[in-house]
Image (cartoon, rainbow, N blue to C red):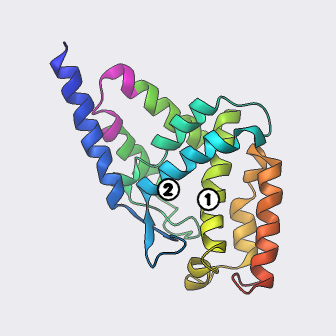
Amino acid sequence: MDHERLQRQLTFILEADKLKGVIRRTFVPGQDRYENSAEHSWQVALMACILAEHAQQPVDACKVMKMMLVHDLVEIDAGDTYVYDASANTDKAEREQKAADRLFGLLPEDQAQELRALWEEFEERSTMEARFARSLDRLMPMLHNYHTQGRSWLEHGINREQVEKTNAIMQEGSAILWDYAKALIDSAVRENFLHP
């Protein structure tokens, strides 16, 4: 048994547990609290399993699930950057690269390379799996916003144009999910969950 390898794996797992403490700006439907990044990662991984058939092209659902489980780990160090906050997004890439170096570096080299490659693939949207993963990552907060009567959108003064512009990349991964999202946006504006 390789005790050093096991220790590095367990150190990484315990470090990943800190994702539960990274608070997002999306409210959990039916609860009076924000979701945390670990909950989000679990939910989009589940979405990958359930919704893979709606990808623009066939995808390896297991790979997308893995990607979703690691895509936000960098937030442990870099924090969650609100997608509609232009100023916070200016140094996001730099903060997240530094976080990726540290976090993935905790693992044994082979696993560090595998998970880092999945994270980079997601960030670069370089494959169909990554583009589909990004679609899921954008759809889930929209679902939360809609099913909390636009609570986070309204709280931050977000309007239709911002939501459409920010989330249009969904169509790269799934035209079907983007069409659904656009219908959700239309309904949110009609219901006064989202500023026109």
Nearer-N-terminus badge (2/1): 2
**What residue appears at the point 58 percent right and 40 percent down from the top-left corner?**
122
Residue span colored magenta:
102-112
State the SS at label 2: helix
Between residue 85 and residue 34, name the one nearer to us.
34
Q: Is residue 92 above or below residue 109?
A: below
The residue pinned by badge 2 equals 40
Residue 178 at x, y = what percent? 78, 56
Residue 154, quarter of the rendered image: bottom right
What's the mark number on residue 140? 1
Between residue 99 and residue 72, name the one nearer to us.
72
State the SS at label 1: helix
**What residue appears at the point 66 percent right and 58 percent down from the top-left corner?**
139
Question: How busy is the neighbourhood of tag 1: few (under 14 within 10 Å), some, or many (20 plus)?
Answer: some
**What residue appears at the point 81 percent right and 65 percent down from the top-left corner?**
182
Say which quadrant the N terminus sits in.
Answer: top left
Q: Is residue 182 above or below residue 98?
A: below
In-image side of 43 versus 9 (left or right): right
Q: Are marks 2 and 1 in contact (CB under 8 Å)?
A: yes
Residue 48 at x, y = what percent? 62, 42
Q: Is residue 103 magenta?
A: yes
Majority secondary structure of the magenta segment? helix
Q: Is residue 182 above or below residue 58?
A: below
